[in-house]
Image (tube, helix red, strand yellow):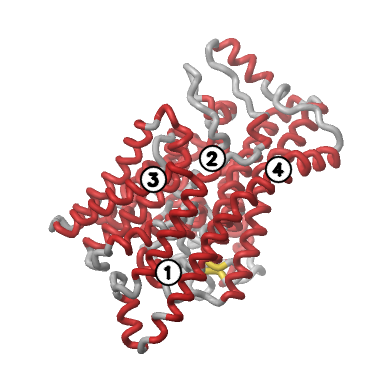
């Protein structure tokens, strides 16, 4: 992640971030055809392992008929069951957010609007006042009801952990340790996730459903702790704190919501017509992403592999492997889009706003259009999860950079490490995020140096426009009649295609939650990396070496 993007005054803060790969899709097992056809060889015998690797594509895809038959089979056996199942999950969440919004607006109109404008503004700023307590209570009741529908009695564990976190915040208020106290809360909050996961190791499925929710709650607690030590906020009461933690639109799927945004939304909500439009559009995109993740992407990959097997073209074996990896990674990314659009729909239903807003979609959690065609890996990760990236930038990257004496590389890797630890004990996410940090930082350093040497707009940061671009050879500044503009565009497209290649390489590792480390000699989920000889890791390291050589 190129966090120097924020240190550069010539570029605007687009906000975003990777670092928030949601656990929701793994926790709620919707129908996924891809997982049924992805089998990995056992590693008990090296000879058998080689034979299984040679025959994996022959047994990977069953014999399908024509394209029309395959599409109809996907529609009848995959799309419809997935949509029906997700609708049964969506309705209680949408109803809970809508009910919370209606009750809050009714109370605000009848109680708060009767007072004078100056007194009303003072009371809205005082989140602990008696007039604001019913609003917090409405958020608590609706949020806990939604958690009970989703988790059942397991929600009591989250409630208990919330009380423990509030006690830690009281210690921050009493102590005079400054930022060290906030760091201590962060360490205890993140470390507690590992303790809970070890305690529930035999019931790992139960903890998998709680991990994502606990991660969002920990982010809220950590951000509140840093704001308290910095003097930006006063200590919230228990009702205010619980209302913030269990805010209905963010307690189930996320995203992280700042304490200030929560207080602002208690009485100020957008217009109903605009919220309805945002909700409908997000729900439509949510269902489309679910269909692509569960059915379209797996069916497309299987069909292409089946055609190549029928033609028996051995020279396309490597291409078939990359096609399989891209289809699997597309399924993973689409599942993230599904969670993001669903979260945006809940935010729009409840009237909750974020720092990043869109006219057509409302509060933005992710920007899929910037992920599928990325300008660079550093620009991609900023758009993966906008609220979580903002959280990492405020409370991890900035603090790490100050402590490391403005060493950007150290701050970047510290940010990725914290992001990995927030996701719990998942070795696959550790591999993906640390690999992504290496690839992204190497690309950013190389492109920044090449842009300076050539005075061309080929840096990892997107061009801010003709008026603000610092480079002479910029297509937006010089126009497309100049040959150098076409050369600059060609170089940027080449890096974009390389980033798409990296996406396929890294994303396929996160394909299936059911893949466990049962093999003795090799991790099963690393089969795809081994099949292509870890090529992208050599490319990522090569970018670092090339940067060091030319600099």
* Mark 1 or mark 4, earlier in chain: 1
Name the element at disc 2: helix
Please give the residue where the numbered disc 4 appears in the rendered image: 81
* Residue at 25%, 50% in the rendered image: 185
Does residue 79 appear in this view? Answer: yes
**Left or right, residue 357 beside residue 119:** right
* Mark 1 or mark 2, earlier in chain: 1
* Mark 2 or mark 4, earlier in chain: 2
Q: Nearer the viewer, residue 20 or 490?
A: 20
**Left or right, residue 519 beside residue 390:** right
* Residue at 66%, 69% in the rendered image: 481
Of badges 3 and 4, the one in the foreground is: 3
Real-space Cα distance between discs 2 and 4?
17 Å
Please give the residue where the numbered disc 1 appears in the rendered image: 10
Real-space Cα distance between discs 1 and 3?
49 Å
* Mark 3 or mark 4, earlier in chain: 4
Q: Nearer the viewer, residue 33 or 196?
A: 196
Does residue 378 appear in this view? Answer: no
Q: Image quarter for residue 242?
A: bottom left
Please give the residue where the numbered disc 3 appears in the rendered image: 156
Disc 1 and disc 3 in contact, CB within 8 angstroms: no
Disc 2 and disc 4 in contact, CB within 8 angstroms: no
**Left or right, residue 432 beside residue 505:** left
Q: Image quarter for residue 426?
A: top left
């Amino acid at each position: 992640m190129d966090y120097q993007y924020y240190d550069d005054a010539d570029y605007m803060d687009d906000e975003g971030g990777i670092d928030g790969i949601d656990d929701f899709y793994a926790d709620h097992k919707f129908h996924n055809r891809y997982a049924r056809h992805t089998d990995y060889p056992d590693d008990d015998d090296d000879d058998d392992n080689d034979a299984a690797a040679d025959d994996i594509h022959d047994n990977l895809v069953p014999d399908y008929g024509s394209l029309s038959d395959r599409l109809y089979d996907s529609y009848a056996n995959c799309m419809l069951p997935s949509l029906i199942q997700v609708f049964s999950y969506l309705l209680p969440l949408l109803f809970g957010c809508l009910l919370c919004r209606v009750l809050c607006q009714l109370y605000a109109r009848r109680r708060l609007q009767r007072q004078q404008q100056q007194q009303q503004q003072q009371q809205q700023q005082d989140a602990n006042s008696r007039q604001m307590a019913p609003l917090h209570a409405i958020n608590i009741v609706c949020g806990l009801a939604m958690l009970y529908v989703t988790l059942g009695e397991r929600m009591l564990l989250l409630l208990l952990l919330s009380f423990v976190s509030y006690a830690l915040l009281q210690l921050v208020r009493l102590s005079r340790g400054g930022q060290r106290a906030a760091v201590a809360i962060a360490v205890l909050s993140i470390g507690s996730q590992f303790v809970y996961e070890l305690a529930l190791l035999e019931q790992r499925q139960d903890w998998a459903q709680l991990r994502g929710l606990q991660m969002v709650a920990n982010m809220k607690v950590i951000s509140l702790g840093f704001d308290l030590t910095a003097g930006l906020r006063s200590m919230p009461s228990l009702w205010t704190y619980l209302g913030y933690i269990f805010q209905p639109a963010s307690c189930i799927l996320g995203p992280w919501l700042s304490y200030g945004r929560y207080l602002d939304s208690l009485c100020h909500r957008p217009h109903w017509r605009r919220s309805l439009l945002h909700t409908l559009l997000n729900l439509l995109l949510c269902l489309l992403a679910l269909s692509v993740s569960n059915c379209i992407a797996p069916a497309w990959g299987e069909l292409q592999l089946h055609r190549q097997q029928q033609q028996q073209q051995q020279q396309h074996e490597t291409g078939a492997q990359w096609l399989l990896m891209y289809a699997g990674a597309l399924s993973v990314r689409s599942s993230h889009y599904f969670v993001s659009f669903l979260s945006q729909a809940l935010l729009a239903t409840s009237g909750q706003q974020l720092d990043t807003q869109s006219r057509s979609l409302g509060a933005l959690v992710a920007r899929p259009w910037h992920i599928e065609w990325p300008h660079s890996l550093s620009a991609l990760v900023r758009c993966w999860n906008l609220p979580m990236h903002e959280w990492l930038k405020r409370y991890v990257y900035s603090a790490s950079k100050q402590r490391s004496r403005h060493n950007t590389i150290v701050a970047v890797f510290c940010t990725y490490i914290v992001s990995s630890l927030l996701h719990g004990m998942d070795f696959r996410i550790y591999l993906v995020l640390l690999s992504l940090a290496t690839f992204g930082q190497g690309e950013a350093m190389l492109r920044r140096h090449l842009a300076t040497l050539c005075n061309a707009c080929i840096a990892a940061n997107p061009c801010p426009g003709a008026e603000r671009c610092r480079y002479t050879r910029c297509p937006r500044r010089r126009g497309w009649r100049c040959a150098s503009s076409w050369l600059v565009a060609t170089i940027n497209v080449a890096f974009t295609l390389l980033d798409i290649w990296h996406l396929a390489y890294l994303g396929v590792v996160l394909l299936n939650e059911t893949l466990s480390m049962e093999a003795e000699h090799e991790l099963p989920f690393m089969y795809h990396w081994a099949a292509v000889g870890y090529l992208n890791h050599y490319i990522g390291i090569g970018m670092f070496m090339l940067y060091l050589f030319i600099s």
